[in-house]
Amino acid sequence: MRARWFITIMIVVSMLALTACGGGDGGDTIKIAVLAPLSGEVATFGESTRDGIILATEEWNARGGINGKTIELVVEDSQCNAEMALSAANKVIDQDGVNFIIGEVCSSASIPVSEIAMAKGVLQISPTSTNPSVTVDEDGNTKSLIFRACFIDPFQGSVAARFALDNLGAQTAAVFLNQGNDYVRGLAEFFREAFEAGGGEVVVWETYTTEDQDFSAILTNARDANPDVLYLPDYYSTVNLIAAQAIERGMDAMMMGGDGWDSPDLDRSVVEGGFYTNHYSPQDPRPIVQEFVQKYQQKYGAEPDALAALAYDAANILFQSIEQADSTDPQIVASTMSQGRFSVVSGDITFDAQHNPVKSAVLLQVSGGEIVFVDTVAP
Ligand code: PHE
């Protein structure tokens, strides 16, 4: 008898709980999913991303949440991997009932997530995925529910190419790329396009795969061509390997790369002197930047990298849009977001027709073991 009562009560309690949480936005909370690589090859990307989003969330919740509703995060480790990210996206949508996803970090993972999000009517904002295909489909149409907080790679590649040509006086370049990674392949191609359009010549174009550890064959080709620049548009873990082997082989080309270099685990000794493009510099004197750097440092005891800054920005852009829309309907929030103006750490942002923020890039140099701010380049 008692057992039956107990079961009945439990069923009622769980039904109430389901009503409260159903859709991820009922009751007094709004559930937001975070998809990021918390383990694997590029784990520092995920840690910074998560930490930036947690900081923004705590600030909003301390101010009373979004229109009185507490923000609740559901964090999944999707490893910058397409399959892992797909199953994480399905899990947070189907089981946790979220209407909003912040993530993924890497383009190769964000692109498949965007397809699920569109199919299931969920809004996605990637803090850091720079490949154009994240927000635009194969026919060139903007995916209505998909946004990003970063610039895109055609811009990033051309900033690097212009800098190589104009500031380093480079005439020739070698480019190494992993053809199986959307970000790396795209950035390599955009760099080549801009470098050649500016009168430079790409004299070496070599591909490798995710599994490769030994780059001696392609490095020998590159060394023999004696290029002015060696462009390495991959993530820090792979750049560390290639750059170390390049030095062993006596290559003296100037190494350059993109935002994928941004990590406390970049081996600065092997890319010493090299330049890379990025989204923000903690040395930027704008008050909003310095305030963020100070708060982040206080909470985590480390200087925020670009991933932390863009994650903080993506969260603020999303929360502000939900607040202004006064709705948790992804379509309504997306339309508010697409017309919004956002003053965030990485700049004052509006979205273009393809849901890409219009903003500047920074150029950084690895110099004397430090990361030094060189220049800001406007679009
Ligand atoms: N832009 C990279 C991508 O699209 C991700 C990244 C951003 C990595 C910023 C490091 C810093 O895959």
Image: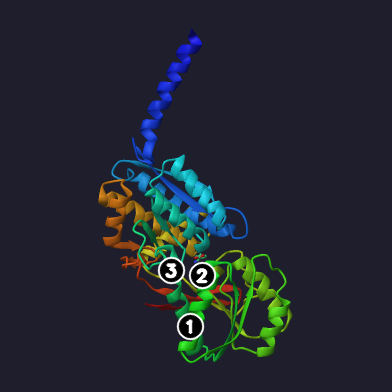
Kindly report the distance in space between the C-alpha atoms of the residues bearing marks 2 and 1: 18 Å
Q: Is residue 56 visible from the viewing direction of this image?
A: no
x then y, percent, for residue 32: 41, 46
Task: Point out residue 193 in the picture as x, y percentages from the top left corner.
Answer: 48, 83
* Snapshot quadrant of residue 312: bottom left
Above or below — where is 119 with respect to 276? above
- Badge 3 density bin: few <14, some 14–19, many ≥20, Cα 10 Å: many
What residue does disc 2 label? 259
Q: Please name the amino acid that badge 3 sits on.
A: Pro
Q: Is mark 2 on a helix, strand or loop?
A: helix
Q: Mark 1 points at which residue?
A: 193
Pointers 2 and 1 in contact (CB under 8 A)?
no
Q: What residue type is labelled 2?
A: Asp
Circle 2 residues within 10 Å: few <14, some 14–19, many ≥20: many
Disc 3 is placed on an element classified as helix
Q: In which quarter of the image is the C terminus?
A: bottom left
Indicate the secondary structure of the residue bearing disc 1: helix
Residue type, numbered disc 1:
Glu
Q: Which of marks 2 and 1 is in front?
A: 1
Which residue in the structure is indicated by mark 3?
132
Q: Report the Cα–Cα distance between label 1 and label 3.
A: 15 Å
Mark 2 or mark 3: whose residue is earlier in sequence: 3
Q: In which quarter of the image is residue 115?
A: bottom left
In the displayed structure, does residue 168 sit left or right of residue 271? left
Residue 287 location, quadrant: bottom left
Residue situated furthest front in the rendering: 139
User: Does the numbered disc 2 mark a residue whose Cβ is under 8 Å from ligand 1?
Assistant: yes
Q: Judge whether 330 appears above or below 128 on screen.
A: above
Does label 1 point to a residue whose CB lies under 8 Å from ligand 1? no
Mark 3 close to ligand 1, CB under 8 Å? no
Residue plotted at (41% across, 69% down) = 151
